[in-house]
Image (tube, rainbow, N blue to C red):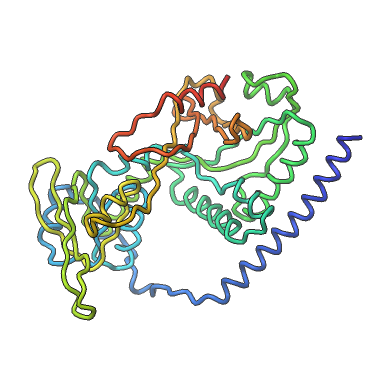
Amino acid sequence: MAFQKAVKGTVLVGGGALATILGLSQFAHYKRKQVNLAFVEAADCVSEPVNREPPSREAQILTLKNTTEFDVLVIGGGATGSGCALDAVTRGLKTALVERDDFSSGTSSRSTKLIHGGVRYLQKAIMKLDIEQYRMVKEALHERANLLEIAPHLSAPLPIMLPIYKWWQLPYYWVGIKLYDLVAGSNCLKSSYVLSKSRALEHFPMLQKDKLVGAIVYYDGQHNDARMNLAIALTAARYGAATANYMEVVSLLKKTDPQTGKERVSGARCKDVLTGQEFDVRAKCVINATGPFTDTVRRMDDKDATAICQPSAGVHIVMPGYYSPESMGLLDPATSDGRVIFFLPWQKMTIAGTTDTPTDVTNHPIPSEEDINFILNEVQ
């Protein structure tokens, strides 16, 4: 009887959630119609790469030195910075990109390797009638489809199993995951499905067998984050962006704006980390895409600038491959402190994580014993 009530209640919640999703979708469509978007004319965009192969680093540095002024200078060669550079250069802007270390040497190579839409954000969108959360999920699912289409050599769909240990959770999570499929629409990778207890244990024999009811499997994307980042940076170079790694910004250049009479950033003083040589790179616009080092660059402009970045450590540990099958991941939605833990196959090994704890900014972060033990304890 209790199970029947739970199922009926979940179906009612699911129906209400479906109505909410449709309402949010219609409202989002209405809002888009009210906004005037500015588009770059097709004739202004670069349709073909300038170079079949990216120029050498030496040639790129010469371009940085010899160009009188760029339209855009991007500081930071991670995923965001490389994406900004590619977007700018393909719009016909004279673009430069400098990175203190190697491309994707920081945060952009240390992700969970997932391309996901955010199931938990969808839950917030429904429970709180939050249109912004819904838009974020919708956009993320759209971008997931884009990445899987344009880079099939670096990304692929990945089934992820959600173990169920209470009967009432089965219809509850099933409705939520089906709504995730619904929001994805034509971008849905594959339809989610339910597994019996025995089938779930076939995939993950190390699961706790006691009280295991079954599992739900849904699909998200997985990609090689570091190679994806590098591909974007090299593509920007092929389209004509002057890109250089091991090129550190040591100070920002400024000049007086004739219209306002105030100083504004007009470029950067760059140092070749490999040779120690310094030179100026001037630009009409400078983009700070340095991730956790955002405030360091901001204080080159204003030494009294208030910090706007709160660094957070997301720790993963790499375990033997037998902790997960080669073609399926696992999501634990109920850890001891309410966070989620993923167990994902990656290059014959298993990635487990992640944490989310405040930390100090360092060039070479080291995981704390507390974070490592948290993940290991959840694995047991």
Residue 176 drawn at (x, y percent): 70, 46
Q: In the displayed structure, does residue 112 sit left or right of residue 126?
A: left
User: 155 left or right of 4?
Assistant: left
Total residue callouts: 0
The location of residue 199, given as percent across then percent down, is 70, 25
Q: Residue at x 72, y 59 (%)?
A: 20
Q: Is residue 96 left or right of residue 25?
A: left
Q: Where does the C terminus fall, quadrant-wise?
A: top right
Give the residue at x 74% y 56%. 18
| Residue 341 or residue 298, whichever sits in front | 298
Seen from the viewer's position, the closer of residues 146 and 379 is: 379
Give how far across and how far down residue 145 sits, in percent. 53, 51
* Residue sticking out furthest to the bottom: 259
Q: Residue at x 75, y 41 (%)?
A: 172
| Residue 246 vertical position relative to residue 301 in the rendered view, above or below | above
Furthest-right residue in this view:
1
Viewport quadrant of the N terminus: top right
Choose top left, top right, bottom left or bottom right for residue 286.
bottom left
Judge from the rendering whether residue 364 lies leftward or rightward of residue 177; answer left or right.
Answer: left
Residue 62 sits in quarter:
bottom left
Does residue 189 lie above or below 333 as drawn? below
Residue 373: image location, x then y, percent: 48, 22
Q: Is residue 94 visible?
A: yes
Q: Could you tell me if residue 234 is visible in this image? A: no
